[in-house]
Amino acid sequence: MKKLSIKNWTVEERPREKSLEKGVSSLNDAELLAILMGSGNRDLSAVDLARVILTKMSLEEIAKASIQELCELPGIGLAKATTILAAFELAKRKNERYYKKQLFNSVETAGLFFKNKLQDLDHEQFWVVYLNNANECIHEAMIGKGGISSSSVDPRIIFKIALEHSATSIIIAHNHPAGSLEPSKNDMSITQKIKQMGILMDIRLLDHIIASKFGYYSFLESGKL
């Protein structure tokens, strides 16, 4: 059976026209994905192709996928894959810049900042946010990547950067790609090591955040700092 072109749909059914009439928020997930893709394939319209893709991958899985992984989906080539991932990256950066502008004077601000930043990664990263006396972010840096251990996260590097930026306090964070928010013994050990060095250098460790797609864990909030 020959597919029905989007051009033959009613205005109500066309994603772009529907967004003009009712706003982008009126579109469902498949319609939004269809607009990003721009076209379907020989057998399916863009919207129908988007529906097929969403049966194979959730939005969360798409956001975490590589270009190569998206290209394995039916009807997705390099152009469509890069456009889709670019849209997710823009949304991520918008959220990150919003949280970064906030004062880091609450667990929620730090937790949401790092959840947005780290939740879609398929590997561990260890980050530090450097703050001034007003608890404003003045710098951020990735200190470790891969399996986080005392050998891969060097407190001397953390505090060297703190001195370079005249930071008075820091918040450290890393992610658990598998989703668990429980700190490991290694997480506890690293936290105490950094806290003690901070005391010696008069640079406070305000919190250690563990982030995943399920939320965040605060050492401070849990009484472990």
Image: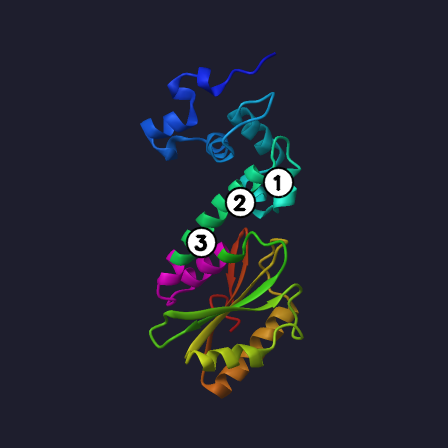
Q: Looking at the rendering, which quadrant does residue 189 occupy? A: bottom right
Secondary structure character of the magenta stretch overall = helix
Name which residue lies at 50% across and 78% down: 161
Check if residue 187 falls in the magenta segment: no
The residue at which mark 1 appears reads as 70
Q: Secondary structure at mark 1?
A: helix
What range of the chain is rendered magenta?
98-116
- The coloring applied to the image is rainbow
Q: Nearer the viewer, residue 95 or 10?
A: 10
| Tag 2 residue | 85
Query: Residue extending furthest bottom?
Result: 200
Indicate yes or no whether the magenta region holds residue 106: yes
The residue type indicated by label 1 comes to Leu
> Which structural element holds mark 2?
helix
Report if the CB atoms under discs 1 and 2 are less than 8 Å apart.
yes
Are the residues flagged by discs 3 and 2 in contact, CB closer than 8 Å? no
Label 1 to label 2: alpha-carbon separation: 9 Å
Mark closer to the chain start, 1 or 3: 1
For label 3, the SS is helix
Whichever of labels 3 and 2 marks the residue nearer the N terminus, that label is 2
Residue 3 screen position, x and y as percent: 56, 16
Of the residues shown, which amino acid type is indicated by label 3? Arg
